[in-house]
Image (tube, helix red, strand yellow):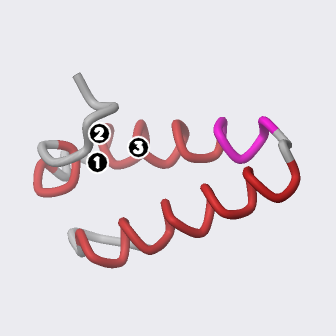
């Protein structure tokens, strides 16, 4: 879906942030974490290395 495209990943995160701020639905936060963990499992270091939540 996102592959190694950091710009696309940032756009998806911005969209999730916007949805969360509008709805206060914590499931958007869970989706963000799941997306990051999926990228980690796929060993996509281009994105994992720049995401501050991946430590």
State the SS at label 2.
Answer: helix
Tell me, yes or no, whether the two marked residues, 3 and 1, touch with CB atoms within 8 Å: no
**Residue 25 image position (x, y, % from top left):** 85, 42
**Residue 38 image position (x, y, % from top left):** 42, 44
Q: Callout 1 environment at 10 Å: few (<14), some (14 to 19), or many (20+)? A: few
State the SS at label 3.
Answer: helix
**Dominant SS in magenta:** helix
Q: CA distance from mark 2 to mark 3?
A: 6 Å
Viewed as shown, does residue 1 lie left or right of 51? right
Task: Check the picture and name the quadrant holding the N terminus.
Answer: bottom left
Which residue does the numbered mark 2 point to in the structure image? 40
The residue sitting at 29% across, 39% down in the picture is 40
Tell me, yes or no, whether the two marked residues, 2 and 1, touch with CB atoms within 8 Å: yes
Give the vertical position of 50 relative to 53 (above or below): below
Residue located farthest toward the front when viewing the structure as drawn: 21
The residue sitting at 74% across, 61% down in the picture is 19
**Residue 3 image position (x, y, % from top left):** 29, 71
Q: Is residue 51 magenta?
A: no
Q: Which residues are magenta?
A: 26-30
Give the vertical position of 6 relative to 52 (above or below): below
The mark lying in front, picked from 3 and 1, is: 3
Q: Is residue 27 magenta?
A: yes
Which residue does the numbered mark 3 point to in the structure image? 36
Circle nearer the N terminus (3, 1): 3
Q: CA distance from mark 2 to mark 1?
A: 5 Å
Which residue does the numbered mark 1 point to in the structure image? 42
**Mark number for residue 1?**
none
Give the vertical position of 4 relative to 28 (above or below): below
The residue sitting at 21% across, 69% down in the picture is 4
Q: CA distance from mark 3 to mark 1?
A: 10 Å
Q: Callout 3 environment at 10 Å: few (<14), some (14 to 19), or many (20+)? A: some
Q: Nearer the viewer, residue 31 or 13?
A: 13
């Amino acid at each position: 879906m996102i592959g190694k495209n950091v710009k696309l990943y940032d756009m998806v995160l911005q969209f999730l942030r916007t949805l969360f701020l509008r709805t206060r639905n914590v499931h958007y936060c869970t989706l963000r974490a799941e997306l990051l963990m999926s990228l980690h499992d796929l060993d996509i270091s281009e994105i994992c290395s720049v995401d501050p939540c991946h430590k």
